[in-house]
Image (cartoon, helix red, strand yellow):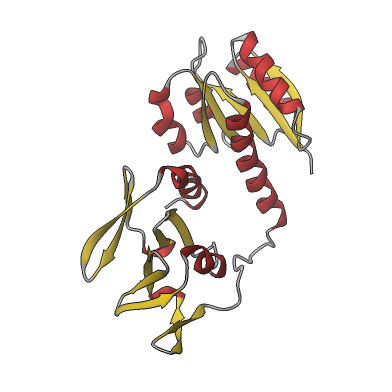
């Protein structure tokens, strides 16, 4: 798979850095580099672009304003020296938001997110959104295997070698690790948001700061989002429009 890539930045040094990083990733193919939004618009008209690295602070037209003019934009990774644009960037469905100076490892993480999204788009059968055939799991509790439907699970909490599965009708305590249970659960339904919490995506009511809100026993329950899981959660939000 070859991903056609465009760089847009008014700083020549920033263009050089991004071009160097792109050249190191065999999945990415740099089509051209532009110094402003008008050049970028012409490039998008002339070429089929899958991924665009877009600076925000540019003369005449900012990257954010430019994206708003596009009817069918490619995947976008914003680049900027100003952290205060992060929320607005994610609201525009950006894959990621890179703060200058951009390190090689941070660039690679953002690029891999985009590559994964493009692969999923290309491989997903039309009209088939299901990954798993089953809608339940069996867990060992009280010396027996209990059948638990995915839809009944609100969230899962880890306590050392035990996990507590919180259901709409109660809870189940089982002896196993969070990692072992996470590996058995379908990622289309469940998301690890903290080293001690896995949440059912369908049960999320809101994301407030570094907390995920679900309903438990008729009351709002707030689960913490770990810093190591926040980027993946925000990425999921953009792809699934929660």
Q: Give the answer, above or below, for where 157 lies relative to 109.
A: below
Residue located at (50% from left, 45% from top): 235
Residue located at (52% from left, 49% from top): 239
Quarter of the rendering containing residue 39 = top right
Q: Position of residue 66 (x, y in %)?
A: 53, 24
- Indicate left or right for 216 with 88 as reference: left
93 or 188, nearer to the observer: 188
96 or 172, nearer to the observer: 172
Residue located at (49% from left, 16% from top): 57
Q: Residue furthest left?
A: 219
178 or 12, nearer to the observer: 178
Quarter of the rendering containing residue 132 = bottom right
Q: Position of residue 121 (x, y in %)?
A: 66, 51
Residue 74 shows in the view = no
Q: Give the answer, above or below, for where 133 lies relative to 127.
A: below
Q: Position of residue 20 (x, y in %)?
A: 72, 21
- Indicate left or right for 84 with 238 as reference: left
Q: Give the answer, above or below, for where 16 lies relative to 187.
A: above
Quarter of the rendering containing residue 46 = top right
Q: Position of residue 151 (x, y in %)?
A: 42, 74
- Indicate left or right for 83 with 13 as reference: left
Quadrant holding the N terminus: top right
Q: Residue furthest front?
A: 161
241 or 47, nearer to the observer: 241
Q: How many marks?
A: 0
Residue 37 shows in the view = yes
């Amino acid at each position: 798979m070859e991903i056609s890539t465009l760089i847009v930045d008014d700083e020549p040094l920033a263009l050089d850095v991004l071009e160097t990083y792109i050249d190191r990733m065999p999945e990415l193919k740099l089509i051209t580099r532009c110094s402003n939004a008008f050049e970028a618009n012409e490039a998008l008209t002339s070429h089929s672009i899958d991924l665009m690295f877009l600076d925000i602070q540019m003369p005449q037209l900012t990257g954010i304003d430019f994206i708003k003019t596009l009817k069918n934009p490619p995947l976008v990774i914003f680049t900027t020296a100003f952290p205060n644009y992060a929320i607005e960037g994610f609201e525009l469905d950006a894959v990621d938001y890179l703060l200058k100076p951009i390190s090689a490892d941070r660039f690679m993480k953002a690029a891999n997110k985009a590559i994964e999204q493009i692969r999923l788009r290309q491989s997903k059968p039309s009209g088939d959104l299901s990954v798993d055939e089953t809608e339940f799991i069996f867990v060992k509790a009280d010396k027996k295997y209990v059948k638990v439907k995915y839809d009944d699970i609100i969230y899962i909490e880890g306590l050392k070698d035990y996990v507590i599965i919180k259901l709409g009708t109660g809870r189940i305590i089982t002896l196993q690790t969070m990692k072992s249970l996470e590996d058995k659960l379908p990622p289309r339904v469940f998301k690890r948001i903290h080293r001690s919490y896995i949440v059912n995506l369908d049960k999320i009511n809101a994301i407030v700061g570094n907390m995920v809100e679900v309903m438990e026993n008729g009351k709002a329950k707030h689960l913490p989002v770990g810093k190591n899981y926040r980027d993946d959660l925000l990425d999921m939000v953009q792809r699934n429009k929660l």
